[in-house]
Amino acid sequence: MDKLLLPVLLGTNRKRRNSVHPANWLLGEMEKRPEIQTKLFDVSDFALPQDNYGQEIKHLFPEWRDAIIQADGLVIVTPEYNHGYPGTLKAVLDLLLKEYIHKAVAFVGVSAGPWGGARVIEAMVTMVRELGLAVTFTDLNFPFVQKKFDAEGKLLDQSFEQRAKDFLDELVWMSHTLKWGRQNVPSKYHQSKGA
Ligand SMILES: Cc1cc2nc3c(=O)[nH]c(=O)nc-3n(C[C@H](O)[C@H](O)[C@H](O)COP(=O)(O)O)c2cc1C
């Protein structure tokens, strides 16, 4: 079976962001799985212009566009900023539209407080629905993230290994199923063998 292509998007460009630790750690867990091919995208690497926005400028980010065209799903690692998502993350997601349709998305929520980004994930669900992404129901939450990793980014709480496994199992199932659907069930949104 072909590998599933599942990029990870780190959703904050804040200088001392803690979200980098869950993103890197999860990337390592994904790389251990033979059925997954992944790559980390970091919103801080996107030189977004101040005077334009959205699909009009997607040609400036061909690596991102090609990755999402080829992707079977996407992992979004988002911090919770005032119960919402960072504007930079929204600006990166808004670069594309049809490229996301009928692909899976899974959320990693990161917060300094006790809710592990539950509120930002709820806020993102309504937004990614408009992108045509299909959301998994097994989020990975990192509450009190500042206590979950050491300064080098080493995970201090091994209970996250089982949580990450459950999170990835569901993402893999959704991604496989949607891949089969894209290839076999006609839709005006993509080419399929059955179309
Ligand atoms: C602008 C801003 C707003 C924040 N709002 C919240 C919040 O609503 N709830 C919360 O638990 N933490 C909040 N935090 C703390 C972050 O969750 C915390 O910094 C955590 O480490 C994840 O963000 P980071 O990757 O930028 O470090 C906020 C941080 C910033 C910079």
Image (cartoon, helix red, strand yellow):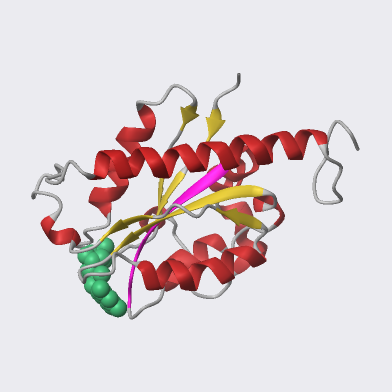
Q: Is 78 a magenta residue?
A: yes
Q: Is residue 78 visible?
A: yes
Task: Please give the name of the residue rendered at 62% of the width and 55% of the height, measured from the top-left corner.
Answer: 133
Q: Where is the N terminus found, in terms of image quarters?
A: top right
Task: Please give the name of the residue rendered at 58% of the width and 72% of the height, measured from the top-left corner.
Answer: 52
Total labels: the figure holds: 0
Task: Please give the name of the residue rendered at 65% of the width and 38% of the height, measured from the top-left corner.
Answer: 177
Q: Is 94 placed above or below 184 here?
A: below
* Left or right: 67, with 20 as reference point: right
* Left or right: 41, with 101 as reference point: left
Q: Is 122 placed above or below 8 here?
A: below
The residue sitting at the left extreme is 151
Quadrant for residue 87, please give it.
bottom left
Task: Please give the name of the residue rendered at 23% of the width and 61% of the height, measured from the top-left corner.
Answer: 17
The front one of 68 and 158 is: 158
Q: Is 153 placed above or below 58 here?
A: above
Q: Is residue 72 visible?
A: no
* Left or right: 38, with 155 as reference point: right
Q: Position of residue 75 (x, y in %)?
A: 46, 49
Mostly what secondary structure, the magenta segment? strand
Q: Position of residue 28 (x, y in %)?
A: 30, 34
* Left or right: 10, with 133 as reference point: left
**Extent of the magenta region:** 72-81
